[in-house]
Image (cartoon, rainbow, N blue to C red):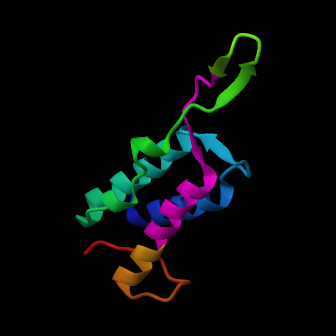
């Protein structure tokens, strides 16, 4: 994957996130994979844009009031707005660093 592909994958990820309050961790994996490519190609340190472990959780899916037990999802989830925050910040960063108009590809090899 090259930088142009990475940029368009990042834009597509943003536009195609499920429209739910919480989304599965696999979306974070896709995001991090794109950041890995950009870091490798540019030498940028993109750690500030990565999703931290504390942003992932297993939401409660049921509660039994008789026993007081709660069942949690087996799948780690993230709040959609939290991931969007990181994706938007990464896209804005590339536009700022490269000094390109918004319609241009936001990053390239330095």
Q: Is residue 5 left or right of residue 12?
A: left
**Which residues fall within the magenta stretch?**
72-91
| Residue in the image at 47% along x and 77% along y | 105
- Most foreground residue, 22 or 26: 22
Relative height, residue 71 to residue 36 (above, below): above
- The question of residue 73 being in magenta is answered with yes
Q: Is residue 95 left or right of residue 73?
A: left
Q: Can you see residue 106?
A: no
| Residue in the image at 40% along x and 83% along y | 96
Relative height, residue 69 to residue 107 (above, below): above
Q: Is residue 4 left or right of residue 15?
A: left
Residue 7 position within the rendered picture, expressed as x and y whole percent measured from the top left? 48, 65
Q: Main SS type for the magenta part?
A: helix
Residue 50 position within the rendered picture, expressed as x and y whole percent measured from the top left? 39, 54
| Residue in the image at 60% along x and 60% along y | 14
Q: In the rendered image, which quarter is residue 40 located in? A: bottom left
Q: Is residue 104 left or right of residue 59?
A: left
Residue 71 position within the rendered picture, expressed as x and y whole percent measured from the top left? 65, 19
Q: In the rendered image, which quarter is residue 100 located in? A: bottom left
- Most foreground residue, 100 or 24: 24
Look at the image and tell me in which quarter the C terminus lies.
Answer: bottom left
| Residue in the image at 44% along x and 67% along y | 90
Look at the image and tell me in which quarter the N terminus lies.
Answer: bottom left
- The question of residue 79 being in magenta is answered with yes
Q: Can you see residue 91?
A: yes
């Amino acid at each position: 994957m090259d930088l142009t592909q990475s940029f368009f994958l990042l834009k597509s990820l943003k536009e195609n996130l499920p429209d739910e309050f919480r989304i599965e961790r696999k979306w974070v994996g896709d995001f991090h994979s794109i950041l890995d490519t950009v870091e490798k190609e540019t030498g940028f340190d993109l750690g500030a844009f990565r999703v931290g472990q504390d942003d992932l959780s297993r939401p409660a899916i049921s509660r039994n009031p008789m026993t007081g037990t709660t069942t949690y999802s087996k799948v780690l989830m993230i709040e959609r707005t939290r991931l969007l925050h990181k994706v938007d910040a990464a896209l804005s960063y590339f536009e700022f660093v490269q000094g390109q108009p918004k319609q241009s590809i936001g990053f390239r090899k330095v």
